[in-house]
Amino acid sequence: MPTASPELLHLLKLLDDDSPIVREAVRARLVPLRHDLPEQILALDVPLDAEQERLLNELLAPAYREELEVSWLSWRLLPTPSDQLEAALGQLSAFLNGWKSLPEELGRKLDELAESSVTEGLVTDARKLAEYLFGGRGNEAKLRGNSKNYYATSNNNLCWVISQGLGNPLSLCSVYMLVGKRLGMNINGCNFPGHFLARVEQPDGIWLVDCFNRGRFMVAEDVAKHHPAANPSMEEIIHQQATVETIIARVLRNLDESFDREGNQPQRQIVRRLLIKLMEA
């Protein structure tokens, strides 16, 4: 853990200074420290209050936004789809968390979740993993669908989802896929309209998994047949793995809607620029 900068405590005390000149000076000193701030503030052993957290986020937000836009799409250089998905979602989680986390934090949380499933000895295949994570067959759920606040921005932040145990269909499926990858399981996404699903191929056929509804396994052909919009294109959807680009674009569209509902236009514009970059790449 990094040692706290000697001046950090002093800088934090100046966060609410009324002088724009002082605040700009504080910002200039904090920006170079931003990557170590979570560990350094922890090392101070002096928790920030809610107002200090708000001011710190406000002060550093421009630097984090600029960094995200410059580094965005770097995940596409990674060798495997799961690596790419995790890196992209890690970037977005760090963006949504502000100063509190770095992109690598998502990987650590996924590691812990995978390790706990192994330690408890309950996971042997994709179905058991779904039961372990989402509470199927009477198990206590580690993760649940956030039906009360379905459109909350935080539902798209995988670090928050894992910590709080709540998420939307897409974020829950993403956790399922990435934890499954750590356990040697081949779990993919299905770009199902209106409600993202996970997709598992087994010797007995293709199964779609509704992670939002307790990890329910469904025969893919039955889902396609009984969907209100059943048509030949639905058959294509269930037989195709959702690409990383498709998943990330869908996350960004979720964020666009969430920020619009919140009236947070600055954040919405950033998300839209990320989506444009993705679509143009």
Image (cartoon, helix red, strand yellow):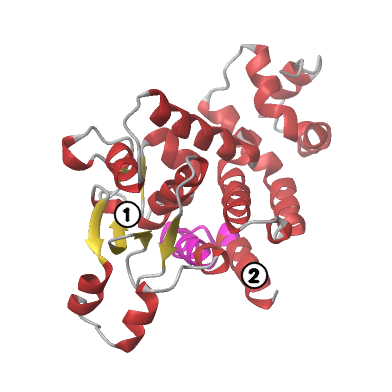
Q: Which residue is mark 2?
A: 278
Does 42 sit left or right of 230 as displayed? right
Mark 2 neighbour class, 10 Å CA radius: few under 14, some 14 to 19, many 20 or more: some
Is the magenta region chiefly helix, strand or loop?
Answer: helix
**Vertical placement of residue 169 versus 98, above or below:** below
Mark 1 neighbour class, 10 Å CA radius: few under 14, some 14 to 19, many 20 or more: some
Residue type highlighted by circle 1 = Tyr
Does 278 sit left or right of 218 as displayed? right
Residue stretch rendered in magenta on the structure: 249-267
Residue type highlighted by circle 2 = Leu
Image point (23%, 61%), residue name: 218
Q: Nearer the viewer, residue 175 or 168?
A: 175
Q: Nearer the viewer, residue 184 or 139?
A: 184
Residue 108: % across, % down: 57, 33
Residue 68 covered by magenta stretch: no
**Vertical placement of residue 181 versus 35, above or below:** below
Q: Which residue is mark 1?
A: 150
